[in-house]
Image (cartoon, grey):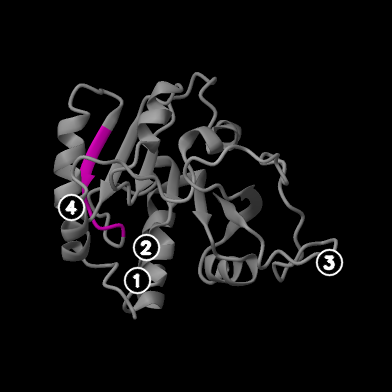
Amino acid sequence: MTQAYGEAWYWDKRYAKESTTTFDWYQKYESLSPLLHLYIPTSTSTRRRVLVVGCGNSAFSEGMSKDGYTDIVNIDISSVVIEAMQKKYSDSPHLKYIEMDVRDMKAFENNSFDAVIDKGTLDSLLCGLNSKQNAAKMLEEVDRVLKKEGVYILITYGIPAYRICLLKESHSWAIKLHVIDKYLPGESSKGETWELTRPVPLNSDGSLKDGSPLENMDVHYIYVCTKV
């Protein structure tokens, strides 16, 4: 059944039940930090402004702030979760939480962020009503708020054959693919199958250059889209 994932009431209802918990979609910050430092370095003199879309009640941005990132803006469509996160992080100067629909971010100026991080928000819209229209609106807004040479980092279950086609439909991004193994909560590392910081070589149709299939693997796909 198609869910109302693009509607604020759906998430308000869900987060009202999870008011004292935290939940990270797909991956925690510790797993992805090497990749973030590769594409959003903190060791430069330039202050990097990062937008986290669909932040929910995740501890991901907290991990970023403890790891050297000093300007992290978090948005979510749910007023319930934003109010809770504003209260929780009221003493954290590096973290800002704003109620906002990722499909309409007019409060942000053009070219105002160095990076946009998305863990499951595009996937959520693609599973909901009017999926294609909502995904297109979101990607248009992400492209608009990114600075030139800024990066949109999409963590998703979507395989290259589908996601790369969607990403390239109306945007001139340079896209690199990285892959990371999935882990269940509480599961210890079973040895990395993929080297996270090494891009996976792809053909133009999204297939692996060595001919191996990427479908049906127990992984998350990470598309790093640089605005050109």
Q: Which residue is mark 4?
A: 17
108 versus 217 height, above or below: above
* Residue 117, image x, y percentages: 44, 46
Q: Is residue 140 visible?
A: no
Give the label, 1 or 4, closer to the camera: 4
As measured in the structure, the alpha-carbon distance from the residue carrying label 1 to the one carrying label 2 is 6 Å
As measured in the structure, the alpha-carbon distance from the residue carrying label 3 to the one carrying label 4 is 45 Å
Asked which quadrant contains residue 47, the reply is top left
Give the label, 3 or 4, closer to the camera: 4
Q: Earlier in the sequence, mark 1 or mark 4?
A: 4
- Which element type, helix, strand or loop, lies under badge 2? helix
Magenta highlight on residue 97: yes
Which amino acid type is marked by label 3?
Gly
As measured in the structure, the alpha-carbon distance from the residue carrying label 1 to the one carrying label 4 is 26 Å
Tell me what residue is drawn at x 26 percent, y 51 percent: 76
Q: Is residue 135 visible?
A: yes
Q: Which residue is mark 3?
A: 211
Residue 180 or 44: which is nearer the viewer?
180
Magenta highlight on residue 142: no
* Tag 3 and tag 4, C-beta contact below 8 Å: no
Tell me what residue is drawn at x 85 percent, y 61 percent: 210
Q: Which residue is mark 1?
A: 134
* Tag 3 and tag 1, C-beta contact below 8 Å: no
Tell me what residue is drawn at x 54 percent, y 38 percent: 32
* Residue 12, image x, y percentages: 17, 57
Tell me what residue is drawn at x 20 percent, y 65 percent: 10
* Tag 1 and tag 2, C-beta contact below 8 Å: yes
Which amino acid type is marked by label 1?
Asn
Q: Which residue is mark 2?
A: 138
Residue 215 or 186: which is nearer the viewer?
186
Q: Residues within 10 Å of mark 4 (few under 14, many from 20)?
A: few
